[in-house]
């Protein structure tokens, strides 16, 4: 299993390639800090002009983009350890660095989790008591638990704990491998990466549905997708309806905008 020796870019007398790389990284950090500050200012201005609901919608989708980069890096890292070869030597360190951002991204998930815990209906209409009262009976027991504040927070904790654990283990073992060059460490990373990729697929697919596809604003995208599904005859519309994505969407009163009304007009029957 290939590995790149760890180096300290700040060693030496302040001259030479190492010092040049360190200066470049310092400039990148300063530019990133300025860009982040400007982004925060624009986010606050957008909240001021467009409201808190728009803030959470933009925040959620931007968050999913950035957490996707870290999770994708973790998946590539596990794939590199699993299959071996020298192809991953060049990107191994950047992948490890990106995956180590997961604890910070877990912290940045707090605004979304707090919004859910307080029961604010900015993102998820299943937080609305009226929506929940419209789904009584034992047939919806698991559904109401899954779409609940406690269930949402508990699943998020499990997801992040699993992702952070996998990233931390691979990074720690990689550091040990740099120090000892023990072939058993490479074998250990390979053994763990196989089941890790399976858990990764499951633990990433569920948040995509729970965080994004069950958001109220998904109805706007679901409208177009479901109409295409009607034309192709597949079951995407039924999935959207069974997930109750658009069941109480404000667009439901508009036959031109609501996918559920369009599906009903086309003779599609839904259950559940």
Image (cartoon, helix red, strand yellow):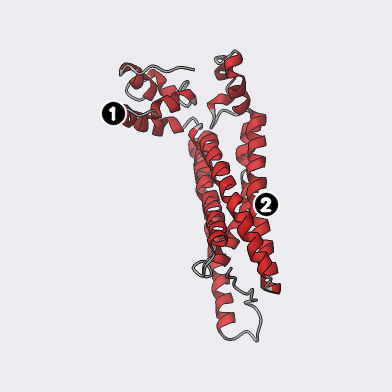
Q: Which mark is residue 265?
A: none
Query: For residue 99, what is the image quadrant?
Result: bottom right
The answer to whether residue 30 is visible is no
The residue identified by callout 1 is 231
Q: Secondary structure at mark 1?
A: helix
Nearer the observer, 114 or 70: 70
How much space separates mark 2 and mark 1, taking CA atoms?
A: 44 Å
- Position of 174 with respect to 272 (left or right) is right
Please determine whether, in this image, residue 271 is positioned above or below residue 5. above
Q: Secondary structure at mark 2?
A: helix
Kindly check if marks 2 and 1 are in contact, taking CB atoms under 8 A apart as contact. Answer: no
- Position of 149 with respect to 48 (left or right) is right
Please determine whether, in this image, residue 61 is positioned above or below residue 188. above
| Quadrant the N terminus occupies | bottom right
Of callouts 2 and 1, the N-terminal one: 2
Residue 116 on image: x %, y %: 62, 32
Residue 44 on image: x %, y %: 54, 45
> Residue visible at 52% across and 66% down?
88
Nearer the observer, 189 or 256: 189
Please determine whether, in this image, residue 209 is positioned above or below residue 134. below
Q: Which mark is residue 165?
A: 2
Residue 181 on image: x %, y %: 67, 73
Nearer the observer, 241 or 149: 241
Residue 67 on image: x %, y %: 55, 49
Few, some or many C-alpha atoms within 10 Å of disc 2 (few <14, some 14-19, many ≥20)?
some
> Residue visible at 55% across and 77% down?
21
The answer to whether residue 131 is visible is yes
Few, some or many C-alpha atoms within 10 Å of disc 1 (few <14, some 14-19, many ≥20)?
few
């Amino acid at each position: 299993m290939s590995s790149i020796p760890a180096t300290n870019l700040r060693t030496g007398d302040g001259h030479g390639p190492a010092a040049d790389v360190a200066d470049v990284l310092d400039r990148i950090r300063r530019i990133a800090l300025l860009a982040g500050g400007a982004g925060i200012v624009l986010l606050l201005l957008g909240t001021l002009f467009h409201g808190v609901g728009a803030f959470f919608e933009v925040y959620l989708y931007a968050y999913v983009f950035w957490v996707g980069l870290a999770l994708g890096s973790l998946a590539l890292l596990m794939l590199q350890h699993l299959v071996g070869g020298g192809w991953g030597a060049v990107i191994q360190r950047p992948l490890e660095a990106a995956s180590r951002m997961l604890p910070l991204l877990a912290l940045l998930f707090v605004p979304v989790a707090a919004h859910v815990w307080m029961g604010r209906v900015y993102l998820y209409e299943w937080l609305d008591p009226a929506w929940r009262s419209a789904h009584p009976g034992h047939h919806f027991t698991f559904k109401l638990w899954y779409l609940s504040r406690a269930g949402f927070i508990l699943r998020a904790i499990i997801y992040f704990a699993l992702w952070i654990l996998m990233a931390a283990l691979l990074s720690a073992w990689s550091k040990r491998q740099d120090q000892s060059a023990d072939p058993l460490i490479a074998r250990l990373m390979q053994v763990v990466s196989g089941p890790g990729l399976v858990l990764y697929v499951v633990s990433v697919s569920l948040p995509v549905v729970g965080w994004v596809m069950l958001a109220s604003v998904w109805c706007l995208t679901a409208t177009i997708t479901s109409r295409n599904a009607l034309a192709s005859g597949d079951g995407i519309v039924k999935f959207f309806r069974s997930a109750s994505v658009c069941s109480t969407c404000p667009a439901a009163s508009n036959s031109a905008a609501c996918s559920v009304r369009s599906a009903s007009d086309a003779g599609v029957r839904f259950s559940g």
